[in-house]
Amino acid sequence: MAEFIIKRVLQAMVVLLIMTVLVFFGVNVIGNPVYIFASSECDQACLTKTIAELGLDRPLWEQYFVFLSNLLQGDLGNSFTHGIPALSLIFERLPATLELAICALAMALGFGLPLGIWAGLHPDTIISRCIMAFSMIAFSLPVFWIGLIMILTFSVQLGWMPAVGRGDTVDVFGTELSALTLDGLHHLVMPAFTLSLIMMAIVIRLTRAGMREVIFADYIKFARANGIRERRILTTHVMKNLLIPIVTVLGMEFGGVIAFAVVVESIFSWPGVGKMLIDAIGVLDRPLIVAYLIFVVFMFVVLNLLVDILYSLLDPRVRLGGNQT
Amino acid sequence: MNFLKPSLFVASLMLALPVAAQEVLTIGVRSEASSLDPHWTQLSADVQVHEHIFEKLVALDPTSQPIPGLAVSWGPIDDLTWEFKLREGVMWHDGEAFTADDVIFSFDRLRAGISGAPASPAFQLEKGLKQWTRIDDYTIQISTSEPYPTVAEDLAMLPIIAEHAAQGVTESVDFNSGLATIGTGPYMFEEYSPGSRVTVVQNPNWWGGDVEWDQVVFRPITQDASRLAALLNGDVDMIDYPPTIDLPQLLDDPDFTVSTIAADRLIYLMPGYKHIERFITDNDGNVMVPNPMRDWRVRRALSLAIDRNAIRDRVMGGASLPTRNIVPPGFFGYVDALEADPYDPDAARALLEQAGYGDGFNIVLHGPNDRYVNDARILEVVAQMWSRVGITTEVDAMPRNIFFSRLIRGDELTMPGFDVPEFSMSLTGWGTVAGEATYTVSGTLETYNAATGGGNGNFGRYSNPEIDARSVLAKQTVDGEERLRLLQEAITIGMDDYAYIPLHFQVNNWAMRAGLEHQPRTNERTMAMDVSATE
């Protein structure tokens, strides 16, 4: 296991390095941020001065090496927009996104698994067909549309829910959480549900498909023949096998949800990192864009590692086999 | 985790309890303040929040004309020196007295430069190479290298911060935390939660008298539809930039009111004047020599071919003021005689025929798609109108982060330091934040000159000695009447020559719940001081 993890970490470093090159040069090709920030009254002398102050007049490779040497010291630069270290901005906003993503994941599993199991056990009933239709719709409809319709219905027409924002938060060990206050929960429900829909649809479909496959497997028949109660068959024997593909897919999906919860965050004005990224791209806040993308790559690498570990715990066949590349 | 819950639950209930009879105004804004350091940026989203907390020597009235702020009076004492008398008895939010030392400290901080701040207002001090001296506790003098008329307008952009609170603090960071956010304004800093809200509370000791609201909350809601929804369901009391498409419904709804004013932002089309323009081609696709844009008749024809009223009614939801002026009504430099061109496609065709372009030509119209109100749709409509008079127009709209780099500097082939604007025809806007036309004329109509800063927004590279003479002179004419004459002449010459093609001034709207009254501002800022409760 240790060897496996070390190998993975080394690979991750190479990926990160390549990523910094791509992101850094890519962002620099788009345009010059000074032209966006500068007031229209700022003349050529003022523009030149600002560009020089930010070090943007130096050759690109030189800028890159300055960036890289700062990176090795843990300094990802200050945001042009906010004048605050980019990393501290990311960590300031991250709890909000994590909270949203985790709630969405919980909803996806909490609704998705039971519905999927039910649909798998009773494939031909009308309810089962409705569940599958729901999963199709949830998967296909654009998220921004669903979000807006939910706001229109539940906030504007019915007035049950607040339309946007995060609500009251509670400070837990230096992290602001809103899931612990009534008002915060109230604000959290709609965005989390909207964000969970795609994951929920995936969970339903994977669970149902898995159910249909596993339920006819020989070991289930033998378990039945052994007289094991149906409940125990479901929770132990079926579930374990069912969860393997779900964990793999959700692991990847979850990374995507955290990194790119952009749409939901902007519709519900949720102060998370996704919204920050979009704002940063809009004004070409280079340090912030680069820092965020590097952070995302880092997160994906870690999540992949976690999925692999979880995977080997769930399925002894892949544990210490030859296929851990 | 469980053991935490009961206490947290109680805490949350306490947070949720409304404090009795607090007058709170919650404003949903399109863009959030990026920093509470007032010297960090001059972007309106930031300035509108700063202005609740920090004040300037010179304030601006709703039409951006200078009025006394922390200075009670000012005037030139000779050609090169202005004297400002400061307001006495003003207290900082922490109880210290405001004096000339704070003004000197603020200007010194700006001159030293705010490191890493690309949008700092510091450049206002470089205009006219201003120097400052403290005469006594309540008098300062500003001297310039040449006669310089707009000292007061420039100082209206420079917030004054407290020397005792801001000495040696970290830029941006210590202002966001509230440590150095000590101002003299009507509201005091309470909380800055990036992405969520900025909260300010009433300053009971404000020199300007009673302050209407106990607390004001700014909530950034970027999405137009979400911001409107937040207003409709009562999450916020007021929003800026309601979607233009929803204005008619809002106006009809008795539960809401809308406030409206023509903004200082001119939207115009700028032709390229280079000998060869690569985006202007004849019907066979070859670049044209000479560039037809250099012919006055072609530019006039393009202007006559645009139906500005149709753009106002069908694209802008009524929220535009068609014009041929470059500053809005009420501003220093507005010319009454310049009326918006009528829509006359026949005259346009005749002019093109006269100029020898009866068979038409092709043009690519560039513009941003996320900068100005309905910018991409305006581009499309203009392209259709031009195509109708025979000039086949193709639209190339792009995000502003790409557009402005290409507009100002040119494409990747341009050598650094040798800016060659790329576009042959582009849609841009110009905001006259100073409330007067001197820098609008100099920036958009004067010949481009990197050394003097003239024509710094003249990306078409229009050049007219008649205008240059007047504009350069106006910048050094302290006498108001004389300067007004020079500016109006320069504007009239430029607009009669169709140096560029003005479309309209953006008309800004705010929507709020019934029971609020709002005095809107031409400079697009949303301020609680302008809002009062009617009942």
Image: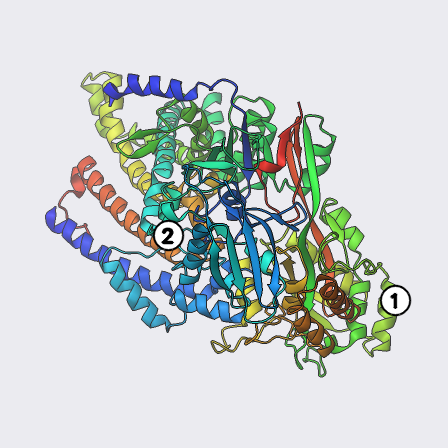
Q: Quadrant of residue A186?
A: top left
Residue at left offset 30%, top offset 63%? A67
- Identify the residue under disc 2: B171
Residue at left offset 53%, top offset 52%? B43
Q: Secondary structure at mark 1?
A: helix
| Residue B341 visible in the snapshot | yes
Q: Give the vertical position of B122 relative to A87 (above or below).
A: below
Image coordinates of residue A287 in percent, x first then y, are 37, 57
Relative horizontal placement of residue B250, taking residue B119 as reference (left or right): right
| Residue A123 visible in the snapshot | no
Disc 2 crowd rating (10 Å Cα; few below 14, some 14-19, many 20+) is: many
Distance Cα–Cα, label 1 vs label 2: 57 Å
Residue at left offset 54%, top offset 37%? B207
Label 1 is placed on what type of residue? Answer: Ala
Label 1: chain? Answer: B
Q: Nearer the viewer, residue B60 or B448?
A: B60
Q: Secondary structure at mark 2?
A: loop
Q: Give the vertical position of B2 relative to B307 (above or below).
A: above
Label 2: chain? Answer: B
Label 2 is placed on what type of residue? Answer: Glu
Image coordinates of residue A238 in percent, x first then y, are 26, 27
- Identify the residue under disc 1: B347
Q: Are marks 1 and 2 in contact (CB under 8 Å)?
A: no
Disc 1 crowd rating (10 Å Cα; few below 14, some 14-19, many 20+) is: some
Q: Nearer the viewer, residue B193 or A43?
A: A43
* Of pointers 1 and 2, the one earlier in the residue sequence: 2
Image coordinates of residue B8 in percent, x first then y, are 31, 21
Q: Give the vertical position of B93 relative to B477 (above or below).
A: above
Residue placed farthest to the left in the image? A2
Relative horizontal placement of residue A62, taking residue B389 as reference (left or right): left
